[in-house]
Structure formats: structure tokens, C-alpha cells
Amino acid sequence: MSAPAQPPVVPEAVRALAEADFGLVAQRFSEAGFTVMLPARGVMTVKAAGASRPAVLLSVGVHGDETGPIEMVAHVIEALSRQPAALAVDLMLCVGNIDAIAAGKRFIDADLNRMFKADRGALAGTAESARADEIIAATDAFFEGAGPLRWHLDLHTAIRASHYPMFAIVPELIAQERKSALIGWLGQAAIGAIIMNPKSAGTYSYYSSEHHGAAGSTVELGRVGTLGKNNLAQFADAAQALDALLRGAEAPPAKAAPHVFKVAQEVVKLSDAFTMGFSKETPNFASLKRGEVIATDGETVYTVFHDEEMVVFPNPDVRVGLRAGLMVVRVS
């Protein structure tokens, strides 16, 4: 009889961040003279008195089963807190769906990353709706009075395989100078593809970009994994770029410029009759040709109308009324 599998050994810094326990890290920054506040459960802000500094919002765990970024950020922040004077930005660290992280689930009632909008319809009474209100209030307070350099990196992992293991969604409405700086950083972080998004789907990064002028991005870092079992080597470039951003240092140059895509069409689930024209296991950035059926939904048929479009985030199991996928085309 084989021995039962042992649970993964989770480093203390990772456990603390996953549980939104900022105690030791907060103490180190406070003792170094920073103003440290805990404005909501799972939120810590670290600010310096005096001159205006870049304001950087880092969020992880908006989906509770996306644990890789929690591990990566925990190690970066732990190392930085041991050299607190090196922090060159005002920092907000947000652990999104704490209860879902504890449960090892994507969410409790509904997708938190669709709640950062005023109209939540039937989802207004969910646990995630209340959590989004807490996060929005903390975000508004963090950026109030901040200087012009504002960042929001919302770090995720994807459910499915992808032709680009690391990719990002960037709101088109970001001012050009900030957008260029963000795309440059994403290249340094080894992000292979960037999708320019013209329309909000209620995501956290779009909210901070739209309402606070932040250079915001939803960054997909590989695939969903178990806390303590993620291969941190895959995050090495992203961790190095993040550490440099927080320290105000130069990151290594990008090994390659990310490929840039634009949204060709949004596939919305209109009813329970919705079906995709391909397998649920289809990887992100899978290619479809002109005329191919993307999905059918009663009398509505979504088809490819460019010579080639690539599918991203295909998910027929979303609630009615939500986006079930994006079709994108490459522009550079």
C-alpha cells in the first residue's frame, strides 16, 4: 500500500499572504518610517511622507484558485520588507477573494473579476459583490491625491493551456505615455502577448484604469496550480521585473517584444442554449479561419469574419449575460 500523499510545504511568507496576514511585513515597513494602513481585510497600503512617488497597486487572488502569483508576490514582498528603505513607490497590496483562496475555489458565489462596475444585476447580493465594494473603496482611497505615475498589476493564472503561456489584457483607454511604459514593463516580465481591450467586462484592472488613470493590466502568468506546488521558475522574469518596479530600478531588457492583439469581437452568452463550436479544452489563442462557427445561442450564431481570429478565455459555463470568450486579431 502506497503512503498517502503529503500536503505541500507552504513557506511562511506565502501562507501569510494567502491568508491576508500582513503582520510581519507591515511591522517591518512601519518600523522603517513608512505609513502603513490596513483599510480593509486583505488590503495593505505602504506610503512615504514627503515627495510624490509612483503609486503601484498589486492584486493577487481575485480568483481563489490562481495561486502562482500569490507565491511569486509573497517572495518579492518578503525580500523587499527585509530591506524596506529600498521601496521606491507607494504600494497597495490587495489579496482579492480571501474566502475562495481558503476554500481552494475560483469564487464563492460569483466571479469577483466581473464585479468592478456599478450594474451587477442579479449578482448584487453575492459575497463577491460585497467584497468588490470593499476593494473599490480601498482603491479609491489609495489613488486619491496620488501623483501622475499610477500602476495596477492584477496578477492571475489562466484556467486552460495557451499558445502564449504568459499574456496580458490592457485597456485601450490608458493614456499613450503610460500605456507605452506598461507595455515596456510587460515585455521585461516576459509577457508574450498583449490584448488591447476596448471595453470593460467589470474587471479590477479596467476599473483602476478608467476611474484613476492607472496603467492597469490583467496579467495571466501561466496556469492554475496548487498553493505550494507552483513552479516558481516560470515566474522568474516577472518576479525580477516586479522587484525592479518596486525598487525604482532598471529591469533587464525584454528578451522579445510582446505580440499585440486587438479585440475583433466579444462572445456573450445570451441564454442557456449557448454552445461553443469547439472543445472546452481549446487553448487560448487557438486559431479559427473566416466563416468558422465560434458559438451558437438560439438564433444567434457567432462566426469568424476576419481571415484569422484567435479565441481567448473560451468558457461556455459562465452565467447568462457574461462574456464567454474573446476573439482577437494580431496587429503587431
Image: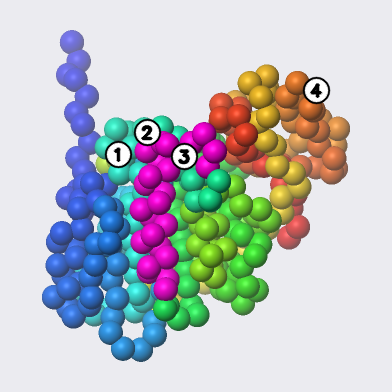
Circle 1: residue type: Asp
Sequence-wise, the earlier of marks 4 and 2 is 2
Q: Is residue 228 left or right of residue 202?
A: left
Q: Is residue 137 left or right of residue 300?
A: left
Query: Magenta residues: mostly which secondary structure?
Result: helix
Circle 2: residue type: Ile
Q: Nearer the viewer, mark 1 or mark 3?
A: 3
Circle 4: residue type: Glu
Numbered mark located on residue 99 in the image: 1
Q: Residue at x 24, y 62 (%)?
A: 38
Between the C-alphas of marks 1 and 2, the distance is: 7 Å
Q: Are marks 1 and 2 in contact (CB under 8 Å)?
A: yes
Packing grade of label 4 (10 A; few <14, some 14-19, many >=20) is few
SS assignment at label 4: loop
Rendered image quadrant of residue 83: bottom left
Q: Are marks 2 and 3 in contact (CB under 8 Å)?
A: no
Q: Is residue 136 magenta?
A: yes
Sequence-wise, the earlier of marks 1 and 3 is 1
Sequence-wise, the earlier of marks 2 and 3 is 2
Q: Measured from the top left, where is residue 68 in percent x and y?
A: 37, 46
Q: Which residue is mark 4?
A: 299
